[in-house]
Image (cartoon, rainbow, N blue to C red):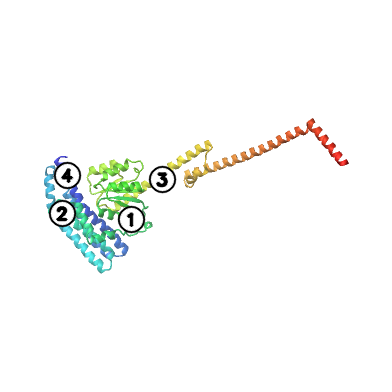
């Protein structure tokens, strides 16, 4: 890798680091809007929407400041070195606004008796502070303290420790209230905030969600369970998104599971690579809720149709095997019972096949009974013939005459 590629990669990694907590803020804020609607607390929505808009502005600034395509190739190294200075001035003002709005909302929620909103508001604050740590990390954080350590510290110390436990109790939403057919979805992301916000959003739509923090853990889960869809991040430890996607699409048992990539990496090369590996779609973080919902619906419908196709072909094979069994005289009616329950043309064919087989069996039984009766009649006729041959013989006639003579003598005495 040459110096220009190295500097470009540094910008990409920097953007990924900075966008991670911003994605969490937007995710939790959008969940809060839905919860406010559920709880009838609409008065809080305007301030939450201000947090969303401010964070989206931050996302735009981060993208612009870390976009290597907009930077002259000769100045990439200088761009990396000066990005922190540009971000420091622009981002802190927006960040302070987010912290201010969240603090105000927490106070109002407690006063109004809406304590159910407080956990997510505190998570927004934690994510904002994590973003601030990332900015400070460029200057003052010791190099031996990496991003994972910082994030773990923020997410496991009070009050965030309590919030992580609160986040485990996901609101139960009636799946019948949505138009989306619920699916079993695997969310793979190494960031706990991203996993939780995405999982809670999906559960509100009526889906069943399983979470994995890296590709290797997801691989184990795929071996144990059956999933209708995988939402996959790219930049992860142990086994990254590219590697897991390649494994999925290279396995005959998993290749039909649709995979949607959701990543802060939005470079065209990354998008093309994922699509070429077999991804169903590619959405950038922070994800657009409406677009994600549409993509999930389309992917689940495609998976459902593919499953129906596979099931149909299996049933066709059963009927073909049944025809061979009839020819060999080995057909069993129950072998088509499940196919006959279908309401389509294939089910009708199976029922007709069973009906014809029953008629054949019935006729065969009748023929067997007739043959058996003929055998009995033949045996009786054969016996009668043998008896006639004996009684009509001269020897039998003499014996019969002697028997009559003996009876006469006995009677006379």
Q: Would you name the residue on which mark 1 appears?
A: 203
| Left or right placement of residue 20 versus residue 321 in this view | left
Ranked by sequence position, the earlier of labels 4 and 3 is: 4
Q: Name the residue tied to disc 4.
A: 8
Residue at the spot 17% in from the left edge and 54% down from the top edge: 134
Of residues 182 and 328, the one drawn nearer to the viewer in this rendering = 328
Looking at the image, how many numbered discs can be counted on the residues? Answer: 4
Give how far across and how far down residue 261 sits, in percent.
Answer: 28, 47
Mark 2 vs 4, N-terminal side: 4
Which marked residue is nearer to the observer: mark 1 or mark 3?
Answer: 1
Label 4, label 3: how far apart the Cα atoms are: 46 Å
Report the disc number at residue 154: none
> For mark 3, what is the residue?
308
Marks 4 and 1, how far apart at CA: 37 Å
For marks 1 and 3 on the same chain, the one whose residue lies earlier in the sequence: 1
Q: Quadrant of residue 102?
A: bottom left
**Which residue is labeled 2 in the image?**
135
- How many neighbours does mark 2 have within 10 angstroms: few (below 14), some (14-19), or many (20 or more)? many
179 or 148, which is in the foreground?
Answer: 148
Q: Nearer the viewer, residue 374 or 302?
A: 374
């Amino acid at each position: 890798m040459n110096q220009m590629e190295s500097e470009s990669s540094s910008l990409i990694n920097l953007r990924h680091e900075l966008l991670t907590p911003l994605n969490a803020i937007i995710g939790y804020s959008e969940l809060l809007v839905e919860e406010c609607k559920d709880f009838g607390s609409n008065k809080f929505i305007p301030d939450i929407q201000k947090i969303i808009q401010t964070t989206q502005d931050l996302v735009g600034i981060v993208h612009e400041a870390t976009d290597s395509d907009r930077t002259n190739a000769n100045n990439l190294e200088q761009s990396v070195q000066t990005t922190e200075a540009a971000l420091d001035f622009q981002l802190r003002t927006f960040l302070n606004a987010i912290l201010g709005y969240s603090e105000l909302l927490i106070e109002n929620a407690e006063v109004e008796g809406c304590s159910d909103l407080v956990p997510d508001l505190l998570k927004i604050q934690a994510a904002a502070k994590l973003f601030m740590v990332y900015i400070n990390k460029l200057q003052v954080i010791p190099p031996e303290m990496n991003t994972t350590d910082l994030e773990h510290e923020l997410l496991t110390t009070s009050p965030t420790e309590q919030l992580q436990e609160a986040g485990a109790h996901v609101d139960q939403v009636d799946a019948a209230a949505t138009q989306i057919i619920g699916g079993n979805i695997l969310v793979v992301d190494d960031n706990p905030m991203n996993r939780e916000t995405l999982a809670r959003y999906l559960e509100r739509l009526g889906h069943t969600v399983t979470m994995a923090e890296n590709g290797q853990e997801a691989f184990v889960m795929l071996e144990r369970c059956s999933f209708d869809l995988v939402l996959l991040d790219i930049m992860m430890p142990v086994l990254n998104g590219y590697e897991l996607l390649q494994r999925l699409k290279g396995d005959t048992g998993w290749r039909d599971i649709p995979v949607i990539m959701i990543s802060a990496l939005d470079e065209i090369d990354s998008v093309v690579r994922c699509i070429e590996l077999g991804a169903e779609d590619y959405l950038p973080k922070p994800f657009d809720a409406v677009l994600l919902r549409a993509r999930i619906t389309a992917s689940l419908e495609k998976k459902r149709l593919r499953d129906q196709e596979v099931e149909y072909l299996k049933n066709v094979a059963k009927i073909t095997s049944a025809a061979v069994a009839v020819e060999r005289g080995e057909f069993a009616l129950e072998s088509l019972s499940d196919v006959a329950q279908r309401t389509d043309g294939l089910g009708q064919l199976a029922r007709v096949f069973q009906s014809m087989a029953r008629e054949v069996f019935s006729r065969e039984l009748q023929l067997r009974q007739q043959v058996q009766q003929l055998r009995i009649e033949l045996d009786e006729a054969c016996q009668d013939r043998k008896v006639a041959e004996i009684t009509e013989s001269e020897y039998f006639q003499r014996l019969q005459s002697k028997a009559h003579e003996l009876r006469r003598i006995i009677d006379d005495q």
